[in-house]
Image (cartoon, rainbow, N blue to C red):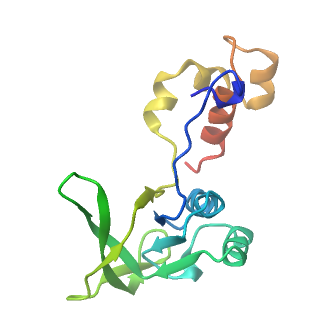
Amino acid sequence: MKAYQFPSYDTPVFDCKDKVVAVIGGGNTALDSVRVSKRLGARASHIIYRRTEEEMPARLEEIHHAKEEEIIFEFLRNPVEFIGDEKGWLTGMKLEKMELGEPDDSGRRRPVPIEGSEYVMKVDMVVIAVGNGSNPIIQKTTLIWHSISGGISSWMMRPCRPIDLVSMLAAISLLAAPR
């Protein structure tokens, strides 16, 4: 989209003005997304997370700032269906209430659906921001990954090809992702 070449390139921004935005997830990307939706004029910005605040992987500062910006947290909720109108436009999202069970492999208590607890939340826009791992295919197929396997500093000294800022940030993100 070439946002880094503004004003030569126009980068579209989602119109959040007066909309109800729901972001699914509890990590830093989810918190960033929901806060941006609020700054872009959303009437209401919600975080939908299937566990409680204590289990959220986002940094404490991100959660604190989101609360200061009046983000609405919907804990122990899990989306099960998106609902649209006759033209295919999103109008709602069916959520089910959850409760915490025994810990899973991550050590966090596993969310368990509460039978018969489904309800519909009216939304205009949904952002799915779940997951915290890099795509392993990129690591196996992209030249940049192999050129920086020794770390960013060795890549900066010996680039295998010309690279732009976006590619460099993507590479840093891949290196920082948990393995």
**Among all residues in the image, which is located at the extreme left?**
86
* Depth check, front residue: 111 or 24: 24
Q: Residue 67: where, in percent of width, then height? A: 67, 78
Give the residue at x 58% y 56%: 29
Q: Closer to the camera, 103 or 15?
A: 15
Q: Residue furthest front?
A: 18
Q: Can residue 149 be spotted in the picture?
A: no
Name the quadrant of the N terminus.
top right
Rendered location of residue 130, percent (x, y): 46, 58
> At x 60% / y 61%, what residue is drawn?
41
Q: Residue at x 45, y 57 (%)?
A: 127
Quadrant assignment, res 39: bottom right
Residue 142 is at least partly visible in this image: yes
**Vertical arrangement, residue 114 with respect to residue 105, above or below:** below
Q: Position of residue 40 (x, y in %)?
A: 62, 57
Toward the top, the furthest residue is 161
Compared to residue 1, the image places residue 85 above or below, namely below
Figure check: 106 above or below 51: above
Left or right side of 3 for 120: left
Q: Tell whether 170 sits left or right of 82.
A: right
Q: Position of residue 116 (x, y in %)?
A: 20, 89
Q: Is residue 89 left or right of residue 66?
A: left
How many numbered badges does the structure rendering display? 0
Identify which residue is drawn at 67% across, 12% down.
Answer: 160
Front-lying residue, 164 or 16: 16
Quick one: 171 or 1, which is closer to the camera? Answer: 1
